[in-house]
Amino acid sequence: MLYSDKVMDHFNNPRNVGVLDDADGIGEVGNPVCGDVMRISIKVADDKIDDIRFQTLGCGAAIATSSIVTEMARGMSLEEAVSITKKQVADELGGLPPAKMHCSVLATDGLKKAVDDYLVSHGRDPIAAGTIAHDDPDFDPHAEEHDDACDIPEE
Ligand code: FES
């Protein structure tokens, strides 16, 4: 499996790692198939992502996609941030192997949840609800891939 130089760079030197102690919104999401989890915390100013951090316990692609999403989202409006797609994430990284495309959904869903967490906690309507893949009970993160997509050996 070949990764782009940019994927390797973000895996080896992930940007914006950590938690914002005074976060305005927090999004947590887990992949039920591989067990990978990620958390995004955001600060919001003038309805834009003012600051952002992530923690990801997962595969290299999950870490790289989380890292690049924080760079993409910083400075975006909340509407723009929740509209980031897994394809945009993959393109920004110079591509992802097909078996790893699902990993980028972790990052985009985490960001959506953080934005909605901010809005709801401020008495406003969520804007990402209904578009968060991991909230769909029928969502299969590996639907487009082979069974061994996570490189986790079967018991
Ligand atoms: S998110 Fe689980 S293998 Fe990448």
Image (cartoon, rainbow, N blue to C red):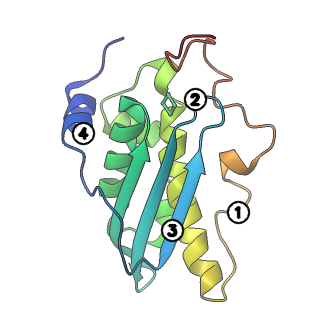
Question: Secondary structure beneath disc 4?
Answer: helix
Q: Distance between the residues labelled 4 and 3?
A: 22 Å
Residue at the (71%, 31%) spot, across then down? 140
Residue 48, by quadrant, is bottom left
Residue at the (54%, 41%) spot, across then down? 105
Residue 127, by quadrant, is bottom right
The quarter of the image holding the N terminus is top left
Residue at the (39%, 46%) spot, across then down? 66
Q: Determine which residue is flagged by label 4.
A: 10
Question: Secondary structure beneath disc 3?
Answer: strand
Residue furthest front in the image? 155
Q: What residue type is labelled 3?
A: Ile
Q: What residue type is labelled 4?
A: His
Q: Where is residue 133 in the image (x, y as percent from the top left)?
A: 67, 46
Question: Secondary structure beneath disc 1?
Answer: loop
Q: What residue type is labelled 2?
A: Cys
Q: How far apart are marks 1 and 4 (CA)?
A: 29 Å
Q: Is residue 15 left or right of residue 138?
A: left
Q: Which of marks 4 and 3 is nearer the N terminus?
A: 4
Picture layout, residue 13 above or below residue 2: below
Q: Determine which residue is flagged by label 1.
A: 129
Q: Determine which residue is flagged by label 2.
A: 34
Q: Position of residue 100 (x, y in %)?
A: 47, 25
Mark 1 neighbour density, 10 Å: few (under 14) some (14–19) many (20 or more): few
Q: Earlier in the sequence, mark 3 or mark 1?
A: 3
Q: Which amino acid does label 1 sit on?
A: Ala
